[in-house]
Amino acid sequence: MKNSYSIVGLGKLGASMAAAIASRGFNVIGVDVNRASVDLINAGRAPVQETDLDKTIRDNRPRIRATTDMREAILGSEITFVIVPTPSEPNGSFSLRYVAQAFREIGQVLAEKQGYHIIALTSTVLPGATRWGLLPLLEAESGKVCGQDFGLCYSPEFIALGSVIHDFLHPDFTLVGEFDTRSGDVLENSYAKIMPDQPDCRRMTLENAELTKIAINAYVTMKITFANTLANLCERIPGGNVDVVTQAMGRDRRIGGKYLTGALGYGGPCFPRDNVALSFLARALGTRAELAETTDAVNRSVAERVVENLRKEFREDSTVAVLGLAYKPHSHILEESQGVMLAHAVAKAGARVIAYDPLAHAMTAEMTRNSSMNGWSMRESLQQCLDEADVVLITTPDPMFMTLDAANFARIKPAVTVVDFWRILQGHLEDQPGIRYVPIGRSVADDQQQARLAELWEHADGGPNFHDPAIGACAD
């Protein structure tokens, strides 16, 4: 018999998981406190914006339904995924208030349910939360015993917003933190049926799985930050090209090329908070996660550093266009967006800032209407932005921006500077009349960089000639 599933929480991840599981032929019941989301799914429509979500729900409508009634969802399924928000607390930890409420309600239904049921927590939590923070709620509310009457796993997904459905169905591996072997067996077998590529399943204790989730995100952000450091260095080396460097690095199997593109910092609802959470956990356990602390600090300084480096590209009366305000392409999410931070920083530096984003337009327009003191505003179209700008900052590698060419920058103004953080227009805008093209992560002033290196190594039999004003002496 095929398993039937329930999904508690119908946000971007939950709704996408429900649609993905239904697309594999399984019945899914979604449950959410938001009546509007429930009604949309029952009408065959996506409750949130996510790639292919609307079509996948529509195509699999007979197998998907939604409700606000936890009892209906639990009694009508065998396995329940809980994927509700775990917002960050001021100290950096993850709050359990929404998960705890869901677990209490699930436990109350388990009290009357006959047969074995699996609960799989998918939301990001810190080590110890599942076993000592949440399991007692299930047992107290149900009057039943975990491992005997029901199963419990911690099983986060490794997905990216904008490709949630694809990433869920085609993961590199699945991660199952198990209360006991029976719980893990059920969930591993379910993943094997749902995911067509039969990914490797890594099974471990609840606590190891909880740590693995935030450790992977912290490691990825470290790679991003390291690549950005290399981009900064390549701008200062004659012939420097960060893509040449990182692509060679990526050929080393110990490193790999994913997330190794020097550009702007990382953003979004997940990456920025995981280093902070890992740092909190380390302090709480009597140690330090200094690498995570540094990664977070460097990432938060990117916008101000970029503006300082680009001050020579614009005057206080310049109009600077920021292309890309969502934290990544194919998304409208503004949370921790480097584009938004950059727009604020440029406006603070005195320039007039205009902006455009293909998906985040409505949200950002509302934000700027309510925050006119930020000194920047939205434009209705990409071309309108370009027509007004003295300086253009391309902050995301959005497909729309990749189609730009010199003709888009034809205007009455004599010249425009295009700062391309992702180098998506290199080969198209170099040496074009009226365009100064500045690819971040590449040297654009080789003569200056050659002079700097020559001075560094001149008469340096014992080492480079470097005077560090911070220590008042030559540093070897």
Image (cartoon, rainbow, N blue to C red):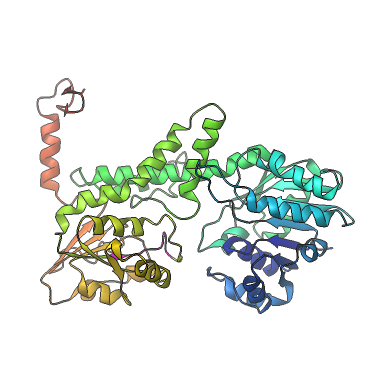
Q: Is residue 323 left or right of residue 152?
A: left
Q: Residue 38, image x and y in percent?
A: 66, 72
Q: Which residues are magenta?
A: 322-329
Q: Residue 350, image x and y in percent?
A: 19, 58
Q: Is residue 321 left or right of residue 397?
A: left
As rendered, which of 77 and 231 lies closer to the eye?
A: 77
Q: Main secondary structure of the magenta part?
A: loop
Q: Residue 131, image x and y in percent?
A: 71, 40
Q: Which residue of the protein is positioned furthest toward the top in this rendering?
A: 462
Q: Which residue of the protein is positioned furthest toward the right in this rendering?
A: 114
Asked whether 435 falls inside the magenta stretch, the response is no
> Residue at the spot x=61%, y=77% of the render?
45
> Residue at the spot x=25%, y=45% of the render?
234
As rendered, which of 223 and 151 lies closer to the eye?
A: 151
Q: Residue 134, image x and y in percent?
A: 71, 45
Question: Is any atom of residue 217 visible in this view?
Answer: yes
Question: Is any atom of residue 121 visible in this view?
Answer: no
Count of all numbered marks drawn on residues in the image: 0
Q: Quadrant of the C terminus?
A: top left
Q: Is residue 243 above or below residue 63?
A: above
Q: Is residue 442 above or below residue 181?
A: below
Q: Quadrant of the N terminus?
A: bottom right
Q: Is residue 454 above or below residue 273?
A: above
Q: Is residue 373 above or below residue 255?
A: below
As rendered, which of 267 and 422 lies closer to the eye?
A: 267
Q: Which corner quadrant of the image does residue 126 belong to? A: top right
> Residue at the spot x=20%, y=47% of the render?
239
Q: Which corner quadrant of the image does residue 212 belong to? A: top right
Asked whether 328 falls inside the magenta stretch, the response is yes
